Structure formats: C-alpha cells, structure tokens
Amino acid sequence: MKCLVYIAGDVTSYTTTNYEFEGKEFNTFFSAHALAKLLDPQKIVALLPDSLVVHGNSTAKDLPILIKGYKNMILNRSNQLFKDENMKKDVEDFVNKIDVRVIPNVGSGQAYYVDKEGKLLSEGQKYKRNPYSTERSPVFIFNVIYSIFNELSKSCDEIIVDLTHGTNVLVSVTMAVGSLFNCRFVAAPIMGAPGNKVSVVELTEVVKAMKDSLAITYSIEKVDERYFRDYSETLRKLNPSEFKEMKELIGKIKSDDPNKVISFLKNLRNGFALEGVKSMKELKDYINELENDVNSLSMAYGEWYNHAYFENENRIVLSHFYSTIKVKDLIYSGNDLEVLEKILDLYIKVGYYDKAISLARELPVAFCLNSRGGGIFSDDDKNYKECDEIVREYLEKSSMLQFRNILMHGSLSKDLKAEVKEGRIELGNKIKLSAIENYILKNLEKDYQNTKNEVTKTNT
C-alpha cells in the first residue's frame, strides 16, 4: 500500500498554483492535495500540530474537535478559492480520506480557535486566534512521530513524506524519523506568493546521501566493511567532458575506488592484520590523493555560482568522500611489529575480543624472534619453538590462554568442560563473556606488555 504523510499547515492564506511532479501537473492550493491526485496513495495521513488549531486546555478531550477544525479550515479555503463544484467535491473527497493525527509542537505563535463544532470563529475580516507557547523536548516530539511512522510501516509498502509545510522543528524531526523507514521525501519549494507553477522537489537522494555517509563513517569507526556503502558504480556513470574546466578533476573523482578501503577493513575485521599492515602505505597514498582532489572539488562547490554544470548533478556526494578519508585514523606508522601493536589496541577498542586476544598471544613470539635476529613461525624453526615455549610459560600465569581458547572454540572448549550427551551440550565450567570482556579491557594490554618485555630479554 502506498501512503502519503504530510505536516498540516495554515491553508487559510494559500493560493492556487500548478504543482508539477514526475511529468504530471495538478492545480490546487496546497501540495498534499496535489500529491494525492498525482500519486494516488491508498492512505493519507495529516500530522496536525497542536499549535495550528485549539479549543480548550486539554488536547486529549479536544482531539475530535481539533481534527474537525483542521478539516473545516481546508474546506473553507476551498470554498473561497474555487467556483467549480467538481473541484470543491474533489477537495471534500480528499478531506474525507485523510487520517488526521494531532502531534505536539514547540515554540510560540498564534493558533486558530475553533468552537465545539470545530468551526473557525471570525473576528472582523480575520479568524480568531489564541496565543500558543509551549516548551517540550524535541525527543518527545520525535517519539510521537516515530510511533505514527512505525504503525504505518506495518501496512504501507511505501511512505511518501511531504515536507512542504510545517515549522522548522517539525520538518526536521519528521525528516529524521522518516529516514529510519522506507520513505520518499518531497517538498514544493514555494517562497512567498507562488507563480503559475512550482515543481515538487524529490529529497530522497539527500536523505540517502546522509545515511550512506553515516554508514561509511560507522564502518571505519567499527572496522567493519559490511556497513560501507560502495559508491564507485555511481561515479563510473559520470561523463567528465560535461564539467568543462573541471574535466580533469572529475575524471580523477570518477576513477576513485573505495574498494581499497573496503578490502583493508575486511582484512582487519577477519584477523588478517598483517595483510592490513602491508596495504597501509598504498592506502595512505590513495587517501592523500583523494583528499587533495576532494578538497579541490569542495572549493568548486563553494564557488557554485561559477560552476553551473553541478546544479543538477546527483551522483557526486562530497560527504561520501570525506567519510571515506576518515580511514586515515586507522593508518599507522612504524615497522610491521609496531603497527601490529597499534592494531591490537584497535581490536580492543572496537570490541573484536577474539582478534585482540589471539594477536596478544602471538605478538610476543614475533618480538622474541626479532630480538634473536629473526625466525619463521614454524615448528622446524629452533628460534620459534623456543620463543613460543617461553611465551606460553609466561602466559600460563594469566587468564589469556584460557580465555583465548574459549573465544576461539565457540564455547566447545576443555576450559569450559563442555559435556555432550544425547544431542545436548552442558558446560561444567561456566565462564561468562563479561568476565572475558573485563579481562581484555583491563588486563590484556598489561599481560601482553609484561610477556613481550620478558621474552625479548631471552635473546641468547
């Protein structure tokens, strides 16, 4: 089911114009009515701010009156603007179809007063107004609107959100809420008295750009490529020759390949730490070049009035690039061993406990080999066998080996005394994850450093 949601506005002064969207037009006095005709939604929901119409002091008691008052406001304006009975009937059908939900607003203004029949009262040539002033948490408003969208999401396959009207707070909150659901966002940009036609603007790509950029940032912060949004396919559709003097720069942007970052994050997440280390220099060069190009691109957007060819370009999203550049925080300097130590700290920070405890177990062996002139991780290597044995002896004094076995064996560990019988598995030694987590956060680094320091002294 297709659903249309809009924020109810003060229609008493609206005038008619042609609303154009997706190649079709409809003449009316407010965008929600036009979109209802152009998109034919099966359900229409009006979010009525409690700041628009008032009756008494209790919204709960006055709810039916407020809803009726808003509907009368639309019908009154329709009767003032249209002589055509068919248009009046069309607006009336729209009003009968809308599901009005009263929502809280915040701030100060003038609300329209309605009587107990939901009729607007005249005072001279104007409608009677009552002062409105309310202070509320925007999060409270967010939760109210979220509850409405959450309900709609159970029956609506697509939710179209009209952000044409509404206060700055309500538009911002509604857009934030809608971004968490399967929504399209539109708005009719009318500034002052409308002309003969206004084109309804699709804002969905803006919301997608924001969500994708946040996902890229989160992907890097959490070292998890699965959240990364690969935008390279979109960039490949660019035609640099369309950008005149910026042709060379756009050509470089077009060839940008975020898969270098994705591969780097994937290696780290899966414990291929050394692969990540080996790719850091190439990645650093790539990011430095990307940053220079994007800074130039950003300057061009800052002088947008000189670059008209950007005006209708949706494929370039600056925030995608700047989010990607944040991977610089994961590029470390030093030799391989020094960088692996920093990756150990990173694993602890992002909660990759199995990777952290495994690396903390093996890194002292590597430092031991290095202190003895080198060696190979192989039972055939004398230095390795000695270093590994020394490390094991030191670590047996801590909980590292036991906790490592538990994490690496999916709880099927001798340390947990896992007993298998008749298809069931019971743990004889119940060690909670919280105990392992507490150890890794508070003691792993200390045990690692102590072990490393001790084994590097045995380089004889």
Image: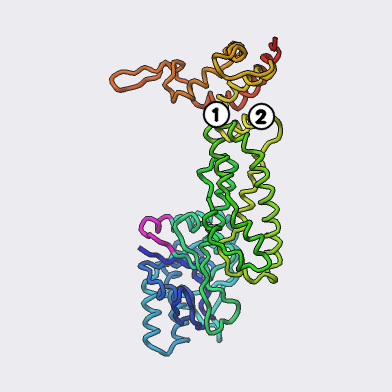
Q: Judging from the image, what secondary structure is the residue with disc 2 in? A: helix
Q: Is residue 78 left or right of residue 399?
A: left
Q: Nearer the viewer, residue 244 or 88?
A: 244
Q: Is residue 157 magenta?
A: yes
Tell me the crowding category of disc 2: few under 14, some 14 to 19, or many 20 or more residues within 10 angstroms, Cα based.
few
Q: Single out the mark in the foreground, 2 or 1.
A: 2
326 above or below 122? Answer: above
The kind of residue tagged 1 is: Lys
Residue 280, image x, y percentages: 64, 38
Q: Nearer the viewer, residue 5 or 229?
A: 229
* Outermost top residue: 460
Q: Quadrant of the C terminus?
A: top right
The kind of residue tagged 2 is: Asp
- Does label 2 or label 1 sit earlier along the sequence? 2
Residue under circle 2? 336
Residue under circle 1? 355
Residue 256, image x, y percentages: 60, 53
Q: Residue at x 28, y 20 (%)?
A: 422
CB of mark 2 within 8 Å of CB of mark 1? no
Q: Quadrant of the N terminus?
A: bottom left
Evaluate whether residue 69 shows in this view: no
Q: CA distance from mark 2 to mark 1?
A: 17 Å
Region in magenta: 150-159
Q: Is residue 176 magenta?
A: no
